[in-house]
Image (cartoon, rainbow, N blue to C red):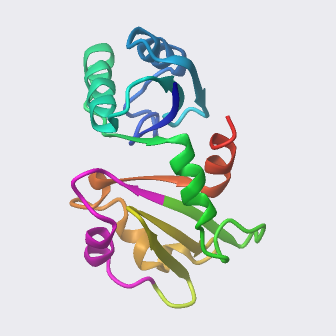
Amino acid sequence: MKRYIAFLRGINISGKNKMPMAELRQGFERLDYTEVKTYLNSGNVIFSSNEADTIKITRRIEEMIKNQFGLDIPVFVILQEELKDLLSKAPVWWGTDDKEIYDNLIFVMPSATAELIAEKIGEPTKELEQICICKNAIFWSFDRKKYAKANWWKKTASAGIGEMITIRTANTLKKIVEM
């Protein structure tokens, strides 16, 4: 039995794409996934499955969400061990205790690549933000006080980019990887 994490993109944000976590857990259980847990209200689902194909798992989850909630929600699925390995490769500047810096990990939806996302967004704003591509994810940190001036901050939610990624904070990921 393998342990997976599903990151749902853009749910429960400002009253849009509402999805109660208890109902979402039940949907996962109806797909015969076990040990289903959610973390926060933002679409982080940890579950176990014998299935080895993450694309197949992703499609099943997206279909369940469409049928159960009437929403087209992009889903990114990763093995818990792969996430743990990815976090072990984080740059030294990412995920620190510095409260002036906000650390995120950008997961790139399959068929897009981290390199494509970086090319579309462009260079990070010097002295305000940093990026580091690792596998098909991007470690991204920015100055909390000056974030509105940061190039990546302005563009990660823009049309043509936002739908290809889902973002989680360092603290959220550190918690999820241990669940």
Nearer to the camera, 48 or 154: 48
- For image coordinates 52% across by 26% down, the residue present is 47
Query: Nearest the camera: 69 or 164?
Result: 164
Instruction: Specify start and end residues of the magenta stretch as a single range.
Output: 106-124
User: What residue do we see at 73% from left, 68% from top?
Assistant: 96
Left or right, 64 with reference to 103:
left
Vertical relation: 122 (above or below) 170: below
**Residue 118: quadrant of the picture:** bottom left
**Rendering coords of residue 179 (x, y %):** 67, 34
Left or right side of 160 for 174: right
- Quarter of the image for residue 30 reads top left
Q: Please state if 109 lies on the left or on the right of 135 as rendered.
A: left
Q: Residue furthest bottom?
A: 126
Above or below, comparing residue 25 to residue 94 in the picture: above
State the image quarter where residue 159 is shown.
bottom left
- Residue nearer the viewer, 82 or 173: 82
Q: Position of residue 85 (x, y in %)?
A: 57, 56
